Amino acid sequence: MSGDVTAAERVAIARHPRRPNISDYINALFTDFFEQRGDRLMGEDAAILGGAALYHGRPVTVIGTRKGRDLEENLRCRFGMPGPEGYRKARRLMGQAEKFRRPIITFVDTGGAYPGLEAEERGQGEAIARSLLEMSRLTVPVVAVITGEGSSGGALALAAADRVLMLENAVYAVLSPEGFASILWKDAGRSGEAGELMKLTAKDLKALGVIDEIIPEPGGGAHLAPAIVFRQVDEAVSRHLAQLSRERDLPGGRYRKFRRMGAAACQKEAL
């Protein structure tokens, strides 16, 4: 895709309803997927899909946010906004992966964690924090793929990984451009301007050291040629897992990775 695509255009592509979702990636890249449900405390959250699978014959754990394809599934998944039950389920699966020495692959596409009062009552912030804590100390390889929209702690809770990969037209930021514009200028209509300031595109984030690799997309976006995107994602994930399997101190490397984020850009600005 051409490099002159604006941030607002990339946001629109990242949110396209036909863009490949977590179920598509599982069907295309994995075999023998066994879904596991429930957080063993409150209940099941359809906004997080996860379980064990085989990846090129190797046992792995797959976890991702799920938006749904039609209105009924959108509502059931709260349009991809997990509640605390979803993050507790993800943490349970991470602990299981650690116990059985399975690498973890996550797929992130969410506008953020569900902001409802009931989610806060059931410990939304605590659930996200514990997910981040669990990811930070895992001794198995973790690869995260930002496939669409990645916003706020709701996205970061599945992206504190050894390698963070990002599709070319995905976006990843502290909040949505509309939310940014509403807070800064009290005008959500300036979201396009906000998108440029936020540095939320894959190119910007690679320069800042927030992500490790940009996965190319066909012209117009992943939804126009999903088979090509599946091959690109497969190649990148496979390559990074092979590299990580040779690492001896994954938690230490993960810690240093996040400490370095933005450092080069800040030094450049200082000069």
Image (spheres, rainbow, N blue to C red):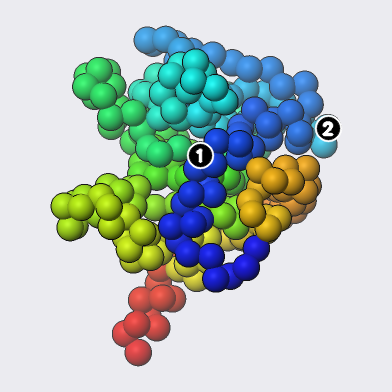
Name above or below for residue 234 compared with residue 36.
below
Name above or below for residue 236 compared with residue 79.
below
Name above or below for residue 226 compared with residue 84.
below
Label 1 sits on what residue type?
Answer: Asp
Q: Which mark is residue 166?
A: none
Q: CA distance from mark 2 to mark 1?
A: 26 Å
Q: Residue furthest bottom?
A: 271
Image location (x, y in percent) of residue 74: 48, 23
Residue depicted at 40% across the width and 72% down the height:
263
Q: Which mark is residue 109?
A: 1
Q: Nearer the viewer, mark 2 or mark 1?
A: 1
Q: Secondary structure at mark 2?
A: loop
Q: Quadrant of residue 18?
A: top right
Image location (x, y in percent) of residue 208: 45, 68
Residue depicted at 61% across the width and 32% down the height:
22
The local crowd at label 1, few if under 14, some if 14 to 19, many if 20 or more residues have their Cα within 10 Å, is many
Residue depicted at 68% across the width and 58% down the height:
219
Image location (x, y in percent) of residue 154: 39, 37
Of residue 137 and residue 237, the one placed in the foreground of this image is 237
Q: For this view, does 36 lie left or right of residue 6? A: right
Residue 35 in sight: yes
Query: Which residue is denoted by mark 2 in the rendering?
Result: 57
Of residue 206 and residue 90, the one placed in the foreground of this image is 206
Q: Quadrant of residue 26?
A: top right
Q: Quadrant of residue 35?
A: top right
Residue depicted at 57% across the width and 45% down the height:
147
Image location (x, y in percent) of residue 207: 50, 71
Quadrant for the N terminus in the image = bottom right
